[in-house]
Amino acid sequence: QNTSGRRSAVPETIAASAGYAISQQKRKLIEQGFGWAKTVGRTRQVMVRGLKKVDQMFVLNMAAYNLVRMRSLAQFRP
């Protein structure tokens, strides 16, 4: 939420819609995965060289993040 007094680039009619709110929630879910990969998965500064190896490292990190999410999601079920 913009509380610093600056104007938002998103028009008020769009920002007030239900679809925009859902979009913001989904965006947060996506960004959490990238944040986890940067902090826990060490992709902030990769230690491998080459596009293929970096791609493999990224896919492995995202697979690990999905496993971590599955574990935490399973805890809420009875």
Image: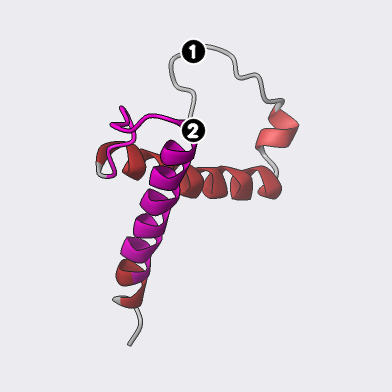
Q: Is residue 18 left or right of residue 7?
A: right
CB under 8 Å between discs 1 and 2: no
Residue 67: percent from left, percent from top: 35, 65
Classify mark 2: helix, strand or loop. Answer: helix
Task: Give the answer, above or below, for where 4 lies relative to 47.
Answer: above
Look at the image and give the residue range highlighted in magenta.
41-70
Task: Decide whether residue 50 is among the magenta residues.
Answer: yes
Q: Residues within 10 Å of mark 1 (few under 14, many from 20)?
A: few
Is there any visible trace of residue 74 in the rendered image? Answer: yes
Res 71 → quadrant:
bottom left
Residue 17: percent from left, percent from top: 70, 43
Q: Is residue 57 left or right of residue 25?
A: left
Quickly name the residue at label 2.
51
Task: Give the answer, above or below, for where 73 lies relative to 45.
Answer: below
Residue 43: percent from left, percent from top: 33, 35
Task: Say which residue appears at 48% left-offset and 39% top-offset.
Answer: 52
Residue nearest the observer in this picture, 27 or 46: 46
Is there any visible trace of residue 33 in the rendered image? Answer: no
Quickly name the residue at label 1.
5
Amino acid found under the numbered disc labelled 2? Leu
Amino acid found under the numbered disc labelled 1? Gly
Q: Which mark is residue 43?
A: none
Instruction: Find the residue positioned furthest to the top.
Output: 6
Task: Decide whether residue 59 is among the magenta residues.
Answer: yes
Q: Mark 1, mark 2: which one is toward the viewer?
A: 2
Cα separation between marks 1 and 2: 42 Å
- Dominant secondary-structure state across the stretch colored magenta: helix
Q: Residues within 10 Å of mark 2 (few under 14, many from 20)?
A: few
Task: Say which residue appears at 39% left-offset and 53% top-offset.
Answer: 60
